[in-house]
Image (cartoon, rainbow, N blue to C red):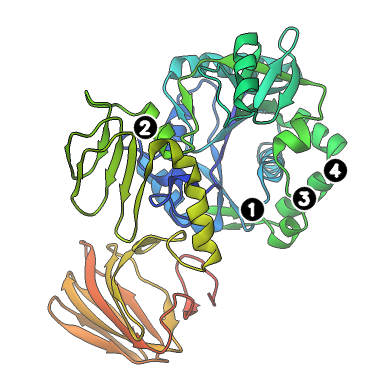
Amino acid sequence: MAKIQPVILAGGTGSRLWPLSRELYPKQLLHLTDDCSLLQTTLKRVSVLPDVLSPLVIVGEDHRFLTLNQVDELKLDDGVHIMLEPVGRNTAPAICAAALYVRELLEDDVVLLILPADHLIRREKMFHDAVRKATDLAGKGYLVTFGITPSSPETGYGYIEKGEGDKVKSFVEKPDRLTAEKYLAAGNYFWNSGMFAFSSHCFLNEVERLNPDILEKMSEAVSKGKKDQHFFRLNKESMMDCPDDSIDYAIMEKSDNVAVIPADLGWSDIGSWQALWEVSDKDEQGNVFMGDVMAEDVSNSLIHAEQNLVAAVGLEDTLVVETADAVLVAPLNRSQDIKKIVNRLKKEKREEHILHRTVYRPWGSYTILEEQEAFKIKRITVLPGVQLSLQMHHHRSEHWVVVKGTAKVTCGDDVYLVLENQSTYIPCGEKHRLENPGVIPLELIEVQNGSYLGEDDIIRFDDDFGREGTN
């Protein structure tokens, strides 16, 4: 059997799971169904496959350090490769880049197993059986897609029509309810899962035949790409010139050499809060409660409390999601419409769709406690043995009060320690750096004052994490 190269697509934002999922903390990094994130669960699932190589995770630059942290938590024996997309160009360019990168890395033909990072699969044995069948077909030159056995006339998924043998007859767009019911009754239509398997050689040949522009630009993006600490960074200019197409549209729907593996995997793409409710364990009243929830006469509802006690009385078929900066309330069956709220947030240039009050950085995290026109208060946590960049701000000064641990501070030409219950002042325009020299997390309160308090008022002169000199 050919070696299997897992390729995990982890570039999405999952806006329909707002307010929990944000652009800078997307769905695949959330712990929705158990103690692991969806990305971690996907990596664990593929790590036990036979003849499997170290997974390749493709992720956007903004999520690189969060992804690295979650990968490191798993402590996988053979490690993980992480490829960075400087700009999003849909699945066809991403998978093409993976095939080119793997071919250059291994100098051998392998079976690429393409998996989204944010899907749930409950029947792992059946998943392994399906991968084995797909690997066999890929070895015969087929581009293989995994078709999920439908359990209902779902209108939110595309469908795959199976023809004779293993061949795909057609790909069908998301149908209306009546058409979906006909597909279900026919018995040869399957949900399009977005999971694929094919040899790198066969796939690249089809890209060259069907969409040579993608192959040309992604070949440039890989050849001009560079290793950056733990990551491989694709070339930005080449990617920006690349067509923005899904693998279905660019390759699979046009190829005459596509096979489908029907599979009943206990699969869900968790594309909405209702989908999460459907796959979660429920109480006797059909409820899914997460966090500190107190309910009376509530049924068939999903309530997620992140920061505070959420009390509910007399609700039915209702969704309630509470975070530090937003509360969502909706009928559970309207959860697909949450993207309309996200679009309004974007249009009104609000930040609630981008980040949470707590923002994670490679050095630790910060939480915004209060923000007014001329001042902002943060709680900052710095990991042991880690330092922030040497930086400067044009429009704000900072006052730091250490509440736990010891801070090593660089301010201009001075370097000194600040202990618990002590404070220091960083004037506007002064080069400075914060470091945790200890073995426990450093926690401090930062008070910013100035005419502009945006996160982009940072000039970096030196950075251990390879971030750009100017944000």
In the image as oriented, which residue stretches furthest toward the top?
165
Q: Nearer the viewer, residue 402 or 193?
A: 193
Compared to residue 125, the image places residue 60 above or below, namely below
Say whether residue 219 is visible: yes
Q: Which residue is mark 2?
A: 277
What percent of the width, then of the height, locates residue 158?
64, 29
Of the numbered discs 2 and 4, the one sitting upstream in the chain is: 4
Q: Which residue is mark 3?
A: 243
Of the numbered discs 3 and 1, the one sitting upstream in the chain is: 1
- Distance, label 2 to label 4, CA atoms, is 42 Å
Mark 1 neighbour class, 10 Å CA radius: few under 14, some 14 to 19, many 20 or more? some
Compared to residue 399, the image places residue 30 above or below, namely above
What percent of the width, then of the height, locates residue 149?
55, 16
Query: Which-is-in-front pick, marks 2 and 1?
Result: 2
Asked which quadrant contains residue 74, the reply is top left
Total numbered circles:
4
- Distance, label 2 to label 1, CA atoms, is 30 Å
